[in-house]
Image (cartoon, helix red, strand yellow):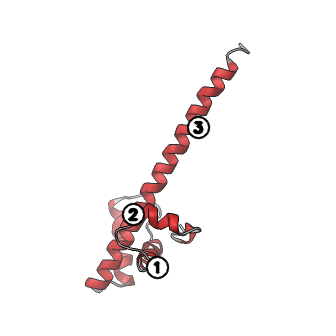
Amino acid sequence: MDKLNPHFSEVIHLIQKARYQALKAVNTELINLYWEIGKYISERTTQEGWGKSTVVQLANYIQTQEPGTKGFSDKNLWRMKQAVLRHLRPFSKTRTTGERIKLDPQPDHLLQM
């Protein structure tokens, strides 16, 4: 049985590597989602006069349509909008979300959820 342990460890390493890659992919998609939501809200505030009360209504709507979904409170939605405003001005619109984040050495301030 001892001769098999190194091979078993290799399988564990493969599992851990795949798990890490999956988490990275999920995080990337969540950041893209937060960016798109922030951009949407930002556009609506500019074009249609959305304010905080409309964002509260949106947060409530999300909860009724997607019960149990976390991270989309009115405060978090407003933070998504603020993140877009903060990062959109200094960067070209042609940059991808990943490029915008790589340029910021401390992106943890983007969304504090």
Q: CA distance from mark 2 to mark 1?
A: 15 Å
**Between discs 3 and 2, the one toward the N terminus:** 3
Marks 3 and 1, the one that precedes in the sequence: 3
Q: Residue furthest right?
A: 2
| Mark identifier at residue 16 | 3
Q: Residue tagged by mark 2?
A: 96
The 10 Å Cα crowd at callout 3, few under 14, some 14 to 19, many 20 or more, is few
Which mark sits nearer the N-terminus, 2 or 1? 1
Residue beneath the point at 38% across and 64% down? 63
- Determine the residue positioned at 39% across, 62% down: 33
- At a point 47% along the width and 64% down the height, the residue shown is 71
Q: Quick one: which residue is furthest to the left in this view?
A: 48
Q: Which quadrant is the N terminus positioned in?
A: top right
Residue to which mark 1 is pinned: 86
Q: Nearer the viewer, residue 22 or 48?
A: 22
Label 1 sits on a secondary structure element that is: helix
Is residue 100 depicted above or below 69 in this figure?
below
Q: Please give left or right for residue 43 compared with residue 91 in the image.
A: left
Residue 51 as seen in the image, left or right of residue 70 = left
Q: Of 66 and 36, which appears nearest the observer?
A: 36
Q: Quadrant of residue 53?
A: bottom left
The residue positioned 49% from the left and 65% from the top of the image is: 101
Residue 91 position, x and y percent, is 42, 75
Which mark is nearer the camera, 2 or 1? 2
Amino acid under label 3? Answer: Gln
Q: Amino acid at mark 2?
A: Thr
- Determine the secondary structure under disc 3: helix
Q: Residue 98 has which mark? A: none
| Cα gap from disc 3 to disc 1, whole angstroms | 36 Å
Q: Position of residue 107 (x, y in %)?
A: 55, 68
Residue 61 in the image: state x and y as whole percent.
33, 68
Q: Say which amino acid is labelled 1.
A: Arg
